[in-house]
């Protein structure tokens, strides 16, 4: 049950109700929520994963500034069509922590808000505030796992299928034991994703320089096929 005000509030739908609903029920209808961002260029996409606070959203913003289409920021919803994984995004705002203003000074004109998990963050509409190119779906070909280091430079380290599977299983939302089919579906999606060419991206550089490193690396990554 919603009030008339809530029913008319697009921000409430895009930032809270729809993401929460899909996060809870997605696996029961053939969509697995995975904790990662998704970017796309020319119909070829890639996922950017990492632990909370690693800087996924800030890097996704820097990549979108370089001309990549933004599909999703924090959670990506993955389905399978004819043995091909498809990444879906929602029209949710980008959540950027206060430190992101160091790299994107224009954020300072926005007001910090308290998010659902209690963090202070900028919640930015990527269409109207940043004028980003957006896509609702993509076909991911690669996965990058973002790790921050204190050492300048960017390093791409190939990672194993076991690393990929373990990361996404650990970072997934808990499903109740009463939904064994949903658990099996999500596990199958993650197992499929674990066969994709993937790298641990260790970086001590700014989001902009890290985004350039990914951009420069992608032609080499294209030679690695699923």
Image: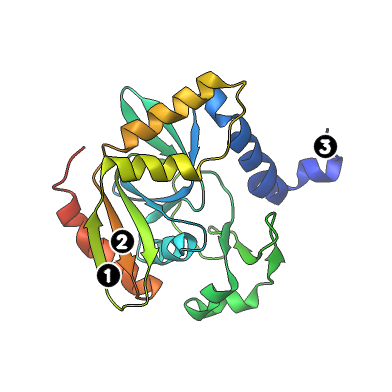
Task: Specify the quadrant that holds the N terminus.
Answer: top right
For discs 2 and 3, the disc positioned in front in the rendered view: 2
Q: Position of residue 135 (x, y in %)?
A: 44, 46
Closer to the camera, 150 or 76?
150
> Which element is circle 3 on?
loop
Q: Residues within 10 Å of mark 1 (few under 14, many from 20)?
A: many
Q: Which residue bears the numbered disc 1?
A: 154
Q: Residue at x 64, y 77 (%)?
A: 109
Locate residue 73 relative to residue 205 in the image: left or right.
Answer: right
Q: Residue at x 47, y 66 (%)?
A: 58
Cα distance in 3D space between marks 2 and 3: 43 Å
Q: Which residue bears the numbered disc 2?
A: 201
> Which element is circle 1 on?
strand
Q: Which residue bears the numbered disc 3?
A: 2
Q: Is residue 213 visible?
A: yes
Closer to the camera, 1 or 9?
1
Q: Tell me if residue 41 comes above or below residue 139 in the rendering.
A: below
Disc 2 + disc 1, Cβ < 8 Å: yes
Task: Specify the quadrant that holds the C terminus.
Answer: top left
Disc 1 + disc 3, Cβ < 8 Å: no
Closer to the camera, 170 or 87?
170
Locate residue 89 relative to residue 160 in the image: left or right.
Answer: right
Q: Position of residue 153 (x, y in %)?
A: 27, 75
């Amino acid at each position: 049950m919603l009030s008339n005000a809530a029913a008319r509030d697009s921000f409430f739908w895009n930032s809270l109700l729809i993401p929460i609903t899909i996060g809870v029920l997605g696996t029961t209808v053939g969509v697995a929520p995975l904790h990662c961002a998704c970017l796309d260029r020319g119909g070829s996409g890639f996922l950017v994963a990492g632990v909370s606070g690693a800087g996924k959203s800030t890097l996704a913003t820097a990549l979108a500034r370089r001309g990549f289409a933004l599909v999703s920021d924090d959670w990506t919803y993955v389905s399978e069509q004819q043995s091909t994984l498809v990444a879906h995004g929602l029209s949710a705002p980008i959540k950027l922590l206060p430190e992101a203003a160091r790299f994107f000074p224009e954020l300072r004109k926005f007001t910090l808000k308290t998010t659902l998990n209690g963090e202070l963050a900028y919640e930015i509409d990527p269409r109207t505030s940043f004028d980003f190119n957006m896509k609702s779906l993509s076909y991911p070909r690669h996965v990058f796992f973002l790790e921050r280091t204190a050492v300048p430079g960017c390093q791409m380290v190939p990672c194993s299928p076991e690393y990929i599977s373990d990361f996404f299983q650990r970072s997934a939302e808990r499903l109740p034991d009463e939904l064994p089919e949903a658990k099996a579906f999500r596990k199958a999606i993650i197992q499929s994703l674990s066969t994709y060419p993937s790298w641990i991206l260790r970086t001590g550089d700014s989001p902009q320089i890290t985004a350039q490193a990914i951009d420069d690396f992608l032609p080499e990554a294209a030679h690695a096929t699923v």
